[in-house]
């Protein structure tokens, strides 16, 4: 089933897929990195749409590991699924299960929306310092388990901004195919 998963290098805001995933923060009102790029490309209506979500607790619209969906507005993608990855604190604070939850819940939400194509950035691997090799193996494993459960995706894109991320995801995919 991993045949539907491809790794590319580039800018997620250019992808004409049903859903792109945003590596947001819990406040969900934009930021730097891919969050900033997506808000810039989507236009100001994206921020308005994010503001609509109620704070589940002070300054938290989307808890870490969870996700929320908005339209894509000026983006070529139909939807933006905002997810909040964990900040890497050494690996003993449940970071791996929280990151797995980001991928799993984003996929489940996109299935519910009827999406057939989805693109992920390397969630938590920038400002949140999650080690890319760990994140690459974990994301491929999680996507593989959702695809193996019969999810009808035509395309799952892992889009790397940097070459190092691209290489880590390629290696993780090759390893997953080899150990299938
Ligand atoms: N397209 C694809 N990937 C991108 C893009 C882009 N246009 N811009 C950045 N990236 C990559 C980064 O290079 C990194 O590999 O996305 C990955 C995630 O990095 P961050 O965007 O820093 O996200 P994260 O580590 O999850 O930190 C989230 O940073 O930007 C703020 O508001 C955000 O507070 C939140 C925190």
Image (spheres, grey):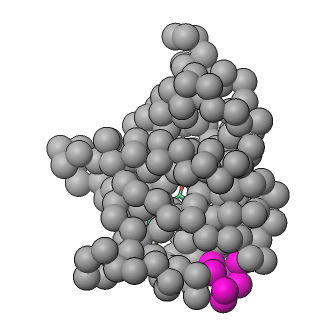
Highlighted range, magenta: 39-46
- Name the image quarter holding residue 92: top left
Closer to the camera in the image, 100 or 61: 61
Identify whether 94 is placed above or below 154: below
Rendered location of residue 48, percent (x, y): 58, 88
Quarter of the picture holding the C terminus:
top right
Rendered location of residue 1, percent (x, y): 66, 21
Q: Is residue 131 left or right of residue 116?
A: left
Which residue lies at the image location 34% right of the left edge and 64% below the top edge?
A: 63
Rendered location of residue 153, percent (x, y): 71, 36
**Would residue 62 be seen by someone viewing this image from the given angle?**
yes
Which residue lies at the image location 77% right of the left edge and 54% below the top edge?
A: 17
Identify whether 80 is placed above or below 48: above
Identify whether 105 is placed above or below 167: below
Q: Is residue 115 left or right of residue 95?
A: right
**Would residue 103 be seen by someone viewing this image from the given angle?**
no
Q: Is residue 92 left or right of residue 127?
A: left
Closer to the camera in the image, 169 or 103: 103
Is 128 contained in the magenta span?
Answer: no
Identify whether 77 is placed above or below 123: below
Please give the count of numbered marks on the rendered protein.
0
Which residue lies at the image location 68% right of the left edge and 56% below the top edge?
A: 19
Closer to the camera in the image, 129 or 109: 109
Residue lying furthest left: 92
Is 40 contained in the magenta span?
Answer: yes
- Name the image quarter holding residue 65: bottom left
Rendered location of residue 107, percent (x, y): 56, 45
């Amino acid at each position: 089933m991993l045949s539907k998963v491809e790794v590319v290098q580039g800018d997620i805001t250019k992808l004409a897929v049903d859903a792109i995933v945003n590596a947001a923060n819990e406040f969900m009102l934009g930021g730097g990195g891919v969050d900033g790029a997506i808000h810039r490309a989507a236009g100001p209506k994206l921020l308005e749409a994010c503001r609509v979500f109620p704070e589940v607790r002070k300054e938290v619209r989307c808890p870490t590991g969870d996700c929320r969906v908005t339209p894509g507005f000026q983006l070529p993608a139909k939807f933006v699924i905002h997810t909040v990855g964990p900040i890497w604190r050494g690996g003993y604070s449940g970071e791996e299960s929280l990151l797995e939850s980001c991928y799993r819940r984003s996929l489940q939400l996109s299935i519910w929306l009827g999406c057939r194509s989805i693109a992920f950035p390397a969630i938590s691997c920038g400002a949140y310092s999650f080690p890319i090799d760990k994140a690459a193996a974990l994301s491929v494993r999680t996507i593989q388990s959702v695809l193996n459960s019969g999810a009808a995706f035509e395309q799952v894109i892992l889009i790397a901004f940097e070459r190092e991320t691209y290489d880590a995801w390629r290696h993780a995919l090759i390893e997953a195919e080899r150990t299938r």
